[in-house]
Amino acid sequence: MQVSIKWLNDYINFNETAEELADKYTMAGVSVENVIRADAGLDKVVTGKIEQIEPHPDSDHLQICQMNVGAGECIQIITGAQNVREGQIVPVAMIGAHLPNGLHIKKGKLRGLPSNGMLCSAEELHMDLTKLTDEQKNGIYILPPDTPVGVPAKDVLGLDDVVLEFELTANRGDCFSVLGLVREAAVLTGNVPHYPDIQVREDDEAAAADLIKVDIEATELCNRFSARVIRNVKIGPSPEWMQQRLEGAGIRSINNVVDVTNFVMIELGQPMHAYDYDEIKGHHLTARVAEAGENLHTLDDSSRVAKGTELVIADEEKPAGLAGIMGGLETEVTEKTTTVVLEAASFNGPNIRRTSRACGLHSEASGRFERGVDVSNTPRALDRACQLLQDMGACTVTKGVVDVYPAPKPQVRIDFTVDEINRRLGTQLPGSKMIDILERLGFGVRETASGAYQAVVPSWRNDCTYMEDLSEEISRIYGFDNIPSTTPFGRMMQGRQSLRRNFIDRIKHVLAGLGMTEELSFSFTNTDMLDKMCVPSDSKLRRAIPIMNPLTDEYPLVRTSLLTSIMENAVRNFSRKNTDIRIFDVAPVFYPKALPVTEQPDEVIRLAGLITGRRHPVGWNQSNEMVDFYDMKGIVEELFRALSISGCTVEAGEHFAMHPGKTALFKKGREVIATVGELHPAVAANFGIKQKVYLFEMDVETLMKYTAKNFHYKSLPKYPAIARDLAIVVDEDAAASDIEAVIARNGGAYFKGVTLFDVYTGEHVAAGKKSLAFNLQFQSSDKTLTDEEADAGFQSILEAVKTQFRAELRA
């Protein structure tokens, strides 16, 4: 938002300089980002009259001008311009001037003769060339013959304005207007504003209600829709003063009708639109939701296909405009227009913002609707527009305003006490001071009890709903620098991370030490990713929460699985020819209790990882072996060891995204704490992946539950261990983990551990059988074992595996 000081001065007088006023605004929370001076570099540029011209004796193109600049005596200036004549008045840059184009004027000589300044062109004065004729653009800029001599050129050129460029926060929609800024200036400077007196002469015999009908179908997206009709419209240029005001706001002048709608939008903060009455089919406008596939042809001559969520203003045949953003091309006001419908409405801000982003179309109007407009302002804005056009002699105004306002907005009332405000601000302000500030800001205040008050919020302050908002208003006007700084009092506590955060950091540290890289991803996904991951239709992972205002249309859902993010990142790496990947992610997923969401969803921290490609980095002394299932299984086992999770069993399992027969479940009792496996071939095909990929997935809360919390230390054994190897032949479908469990139960008091070190099928082993070789460890903590004691444990184990697995000793 930018506005010129001249426009502010139209409604309030103040003695502060532009910089001082900008500082007051900023300190009150209405941030001024920049002060732009149109007269920058014109301090020593004055108007001068060419009294005499004669050719330069040593040049065929230079001319010697004797200039009257109001200093009594003429000064000599040499110029090469060919469009100057005696008696003309032109801008003259005096010695010492620093022009906007960076040129520094010094006393000098041209072909031996002195020159004491320079005659200026429009470009050198930084004038807007688009508003000038070709003759004014070329050569020296010639001023009107009645221009006084010796006065600052900026005054006669209209370059004496200053523009304030505001960087307003989203909650201050009321300041996106000149009158809103005037209200603030009045409070900050103590001056009394003089707002425009809006009066309309309804000088046309026709009634607006007989000419146009307006309706609201989407009442949740449009809460007020107002219209006026003007006839006998004469399309033409706007007055110079209006063009200057709009130019100061960064808006290009088009014609009087369009300029007036823009002027009222900037002045009152209420966007408006003008329709050619004769192009409105059925002379009926309706605020409704667009139908999916409907064509939206806007003023920028672009056609967009509606998705069925956009709010449009439609006539009886088609949309006549994209509500709150841009009007339609078919109903545009042109030079042939004689009757105009002026429309002002109040639209739902979040819907306008979503539509604006989806269409990639942002306008001055949409920016205001997104932040919220004063719903009570629509008839006033229409009256102001009619008044301005009448003053130009550009129309007649029909009788009445067609106004549809089905659910008037109730007044917001806020109860507060003086003590509450002072406690919050750390001040000792009296109630009278607080009331004075609030009333100057437009709030109505009445006392309800001793020291207790009720404030009635003005219609333009949509951001004020609680006592805390009132305390902010009081503090910013009272002055933040007037509030004393005090040291907070309270018991000092050492800041520390939560146990969960420490646990997650341990996970990240271990996996990074194992050569994996942490990825950071958005918590969003889409149904296409769930389809590619082959998530079952009845899985809870399909019950993802839709986002009301997604960052992009590609990610409309909140993710329910980390594997979607992991796979998306892997595919992005594959597309960039990086096929050696080791990544993991520790992040939340979200499960709704019900859809649509009525309460906070469950946020669950999950851990997922992926490896693929070569086992070792490329190097002359490294092999090109590819990672396999056991690399991923080893990573998980090492993670569990580092997290002090022991006693896990591993068994074959199933997972929708992993290869059947190549998926393992790590369990503690009956609870699955990790799933490890090869990517399912169907999932790999969906993503276009042509190499083996391995995944793991687990729940962080479950890992925390099983990590060891109490540790007991034992001294190292003093006595040697005895090892025995057991090689047995069992059925091919016998699980080694089941056999190890039987070995542990039957090993006796001196049994210490078992390790599987060989698996063999093939020659010398019968079909349907396999050979398993285990290393058994026996040890005593208080003596040296004898072979007989170790053999007793070995025989007990052998008998048990023969009985339970029909095992045979392998010869």
Image: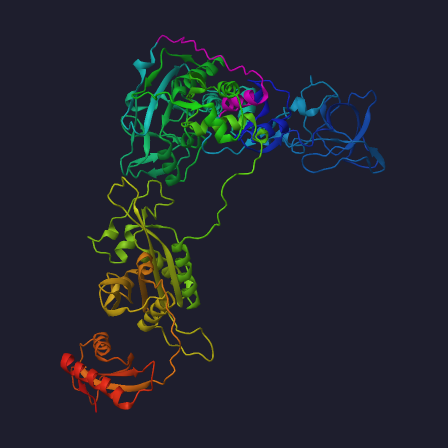
- Residue at image position (62%, 25%) is 161
For the residue pair 259 and 689, the one nearer the viewer reads as 689
Asked if residue 708 shows in the view, the reply is yes
Q: Is residue 7 above or below residue 80?
A: above
Which stretch appears magenta? 177-205
For the residue pair 433 and 105, the one nearer the viewer reads as 433
Give the left or right position of residue 555, taking residue 154 as reference: left
Residue 385: where, in percent of width, then height? 45, 18
Quadrant for the C terminus in the image: bottom left
Q: Is residue 445 above or below residue 96?
A: above
Residue 81: where, in percent of width, then height? 72, 32
Give the left or right position of residue 130, taking residue 150 as reference: left
Residue 170: where, in percent of width, then height? 45, 33
For the residue pair 624 and 337, the one nearer the viewer reads as 624
Residue lying at the far bottom in this picture: please name it.
811
Q: Is residue 190 above or below residue 685?
A: above
Residue lying at the far front in this picture: please name it.
782
Give the left or right position of residue 154, taking residue 454 as reference: right
Asked if residue 22 shows in the view, the reply is no
User: How many numbered badges does the structure rendering display?
Assistant: 0
| Residue 154, quarter of picture | top right
For the residue pair 54 and 769, the one nearer the viewer reads as 769
Residue 803: where, in percent of width, then height? 14, 81
- Residue at image position (47%, 19%) is 442
| Residue 82, quarter of picture | top right
Q: Is residue 637 above or below residue 23?
A: below
Residue lying at the far right in this picture: please name it.
112
Magenta highlight on residue 3: no
| Residue 190, quarter of picture | top right
Q: How is the image coloured?
A: rainbow
